[in-house]
Amino acid sequence: MIFTDFAKAIGQLSDPRFKRVLFLGIALTIALLFGIYALFLVLINSFAPEALVLPIVGEITWVKDLLGWGSILFMLILSFFLMIPVASAFTGLFLEDVAKAVEHKYYPALPPTPRIPFREVLVDTLNFLGVLIAANLLAVFVYAFLNVLSPLLFWTLNGYLLGREYFQMAAMRRLGRARAKALRKKHWREIWVAGVLMTVPLTIPLINLLIPVLAAATFTHMFQRLDGGVK
């Protein structure tokens, strides 16, 4: 069932309405990735004002190399980690547009939904993002202890958190907060698995740029199926 939801998301790539959302989503994803990376460099610069020298990449400085090829390569490498908070931030900013494109094609009989106030969306997004960052910071020591198994914990932990967030946001549009939470708790195992399947490709540079949009579409289909909208 999860793969059917994802296949529907992939199958809509040729839809002109979805293409527009996809390209805007990729642009937003790149902007979010670049912004978080710039913040990362600010933190690095505050602790190490001199140039940072990395193997292969070479010298990384703050403003000078932010747009340089060495820095871009470094950003792609770091996207293994950085795309997780990017995907989290993406839900509040763009999930509504993706969901509408999906519903226009697959669920045209559904009544329109009022757009959730931006203030409420922003609060939810920051809360989810805060939980995500805090959980990963707490898990850093466990990652170090597990060595080669640490990616499995990384995918499992963030798959749970991102799946929870994406499904909750998709369901809230139609059910409201309380009913969305109840539905999520009822199907938490399937949502967790879907979240892990989303998180793994998020750690693959370049491919991960497509995932936030496809994940938003996939969880929209999943919500409709689990809520009984699809028989």
Image: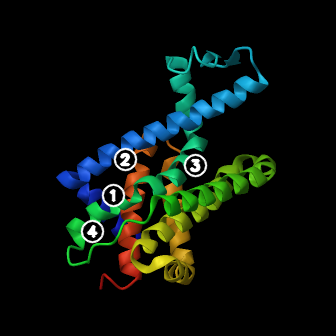
Q: Which residue is mark 2?
A: 25
Q: Which residue is mark 4?
A: 103
* Numbered circle sitting on residue 143: none
Between marks 1 and 2, how big is the CA–CA gap? Answer: 9 Å
Amino acid type, mark 3: Pro
* Numbered circle sitting on residue 97: 1
Q: Quadrant of residue 102?
A: bottom left
* Nearer the observer, 204 or 78: 78
Dots 2, 4 in contact, CB < 8 A:
no
Question: What is the x, y in percent for residue 6?
Answer: 36, 63
Q: Nearer the viewer, mark 1 or mark 4?
A: 1
Q: Quadrant of residue 128?
A: bottom right
Query: At 70% from the left edge and 14% from the top edge, which residue is drawn?
Result: 51
Q: Determine whether 201 is above or below 175 in the image.
A: above
Dots 1, 4 in contact, CB < 8 A:
no
Amino acid type, mark 2: Gly
SS at circle 4: helix
Q: Which residue is mark 3?
A: 85
Q: Earlier in the sequence, mark 3 or mark 2?
A: 2
Q: Earlier in the sequence, mark 3 or mark 1?
A: 3
Q: Earlier in the sequence, mark 1 or mark 2?
A: 2
Q: On the picture, is 179 further left or further right than 99?
A: right
Q: Determine whether 159 is above or below 86 in the image.
A: below
Amino acid type, mark 1: Asp
Q: Determine whether 59 is above or below 90 in the image.
A: above
Q: Is residue 24 visible?
A: yes
